[in-house]
Image (spheres, helix red, strand yellow):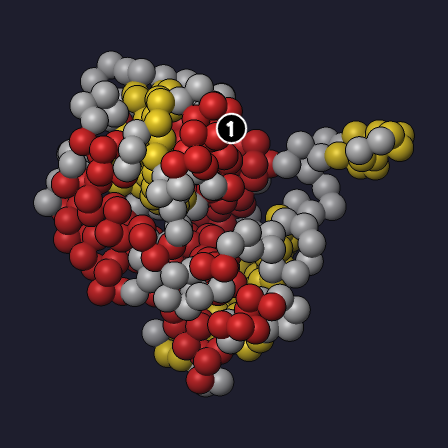
Amino acid sequence: MTGPVRIGIIGAGRIARTHAAAYKSVGRGVLTACSDVNLQAAQNFADENGLAVLASADALLASPDIDGVIIATPNGLHAEQTIAALRAGKHVFCQKPIAMTIPEANDVIAESEQRPQQILQYGFMLRFTPPLGAIRERLKNGSLGDPIVSRSAIFGWEPSARWFYDPKEGGGVILDTMVHFADLILWLFGPVDYIHADGGAYVLEGAKEFRSADNAVVTVKHKSGVISHQYVTWTAGHGNFTFEIYGSRGEVAVDLVRSQASAAFMKPVVGGCGWEFPDLVWRYGYGGEQQHFVDRILGLSNDPDAAADVYAARNALALVLDAQRALDEKEIVRC
């Protein structure tokens, strides 16, 4: 295939708009069509981005004019729709998580292993967000010495729909939001020995209704000896994260909440004022992972560890499911 890669997107919600924005800077790939169970939402999204609207996900997957699909639907649909897309012969980029359960994730793996010629990539954009790739290189080259402890605070936006809170559909704050850092810490520090978690429904009515946490703390002991500590929240009123690593020879810290690559201050005007930052996650992370997806379809990238594959996605799911179990059972969960 020589390109451009023609991409369709299933889902027309908040994360779909994030990916559509990313494609404005993606080379050799273009969004061409969308579908959503809410046809008006699909039409609005299509009008915003110059796309064709197809009547259903099945119609989009059946289209010969689409090479790859982005699955940007509620979490509980990911496994089923990924399998359907693979069977339709499409390359697949799926938002996290891979599935809601390990058996579902294993079904996806089994399907993907039958189709090694098709790309299956997962939406863990932190791998493509500066400076996290450089931090991984520091860990690999030993400039920090032996890593000992990491600390992170993960700020997710308040959910935009009830399904986020539902343990069967969205999974709550650990599965939906901390899963990004589950992949990150596995990528940086390796497999898990045991997990402890605590938290609860402190603020949000949806979390209280479904008895799922809107704030949680998860401590992971890795088999490498590293201890990683994650605070994850939906109630801070802003997004992004802080991340620190302490090693035997040095330390490194990232604060994408209060500082970015540059900053600008705007005097008060109607509609907004104050400091503005060119957010690295939204500007580079999502665009980077989509560029990598397109390049892999075209055979231009062979880095097997840059993006999260189906096995990494299952490992991240396993970590957050164990963390949720540690929270629910108030016990240390050995992995």
Residue at 30 percent of width and 29 percent of height = 54
Q: Nearer the viewer, residue 101 or 251?
A: 101
Q: Which residue is mark 1?
A: 21
Q: Is residue 301 left or right of residue 126?
A: left
In the figure, 200 relative to 230: above or below? below
Q: Nearer the viewer, residue 59 or 277?
A: 59
Q: Is residue 313 left or right of residue 323?
A: left
Can the viewer see residue 12? yes
Could you tell me residue 104's position as x and y percent? Answer: 24, 60
Q: Nearer the viewer, residue 258 or 11?
A: 11
Can the viewer see residue 221? no
- The quarter in which the C terminus is drawn is bottom left
- The quarter in which the N terminus is drawn is top left
Residue at 40 percent of width and 27 percent of height = 291
Q: Amino acid at mark 1?
A: Ala
Q: Where, by quadrant of the figure, is residue 217 drawn?
A: bottom right
